[in-house]
Image (spheres, rainbow, N blue to C red):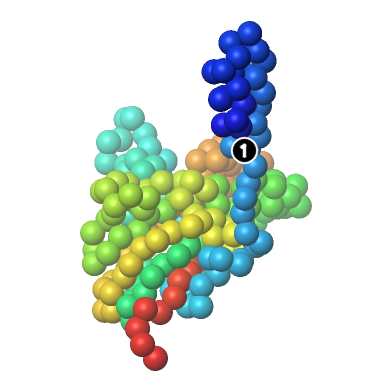
Amino acid sequence: MLALVDQAAADPSSARRLLQEAQVLVDQELRTERLPPDGYVYAGAETLIAKFDRVQVEPLPDEDNPQIRPLSQTSNDPREIKVPFDFLAEGVSAWAIPILPTWADISELKGIAEMGANTDGRDLFSLSWGLDGDNLYTSDGWRSHLEPAASLVGPRRRPRPLCWQLTRGRIINVWVRNLTNALNPTGFASERDAGWDLSIVVEFHGVKMEAA
């Protein structure tokens, strides 16, 4: 690629064609995913887990009711993970499992099953995490609110790369919000409340940084 650029500089009559060829090579390079096999690099030797057994939906924002929280916030209490040893988190993954309502009929259950288009249902909820009760932005350390899980974490078989060094005794706080009522705000034919409960798991994969 650099050789093509050098040739273009040396031969102005061919510069246009050579630079077009270089652009094609750049585009190909940017579109090529050089990823390791599933679970190879970021399936750490240790896993710290935050599990939410039954996360219910929260009221959707209403401009006529300012007391209702925006989608970027939650009234749910965080799960706490006490870091058991000095730990380097190399990746983070999460998933959601729908808890199917007993009132739904076959067509509604089919609609629920097809609602999550993102791998492991990561479009069905949002999350955030921080240390010792401080809600931190989960990408670069700045304070923020909940973000869609699909943009922050990877699926179980390919965790999102992370490099987060944690010391023994710190407390990881994990917040989640169920978004299924936002995805299906009109509800189903049975006219029950929109959305459904979720079981959510968030995992930090990494290695122990202490001597054995």
Residue extending furthest bottom?
212
The residue beneath circle 1 is: 29
Q: In the visual, does 170 lie left or right of 104?
A: left
Asked whether the viewer can see residue 56, the reply is: yes
Quarter that holds the C terminus = bottom left
Residue 141: x and y in percent read 29, 52
Residue 205: x and y in percent read 48, 69
| Most foreground residue, 145 or 14 | 14
Instruction: Please tell me whether residue 58 is drawn above or below residue 206 in the rendered image.
Output: above
| Most foreground residue, 77 or 85 | 85
Instruction: Please tell me whether residue 10 is drawn above or below residue 171 in the rendered image.
Output: above
The residue shown at (30%, 60%) is: 130
The residue shown at (27%, 64%) is: 131
Residue extending furthest top?
13
Residue extending furthest right?
106
| Most foreground residue, 36 or 105 | 36
Give the total number of marks visible in the rendering. 1
| Most foreground residue, 80 or 92 | 92
The residue shown at (65%, 56%) is: 103
Asked whether the viewer can see residue 101, the reply is: no
Q: Amino acid at mark 1?
A: Glu
Picture quarter containing residue 5? top right
Q: In the visual, does 144 lie left or right of 35?
A: left
Mark 1 crowdedness (10 Å alpha carbons): few <14, some 14-19, many ≥20: few
Quarter that holds the N terminus = top right
Picture quarter containing residue 22? top right
Residue 195: x and y in percent read 54, 48
The residue shown at (26%, 79%) is: 169
Residue 93: x and y in percent read 51, 61
Dot 1: what SS? helix
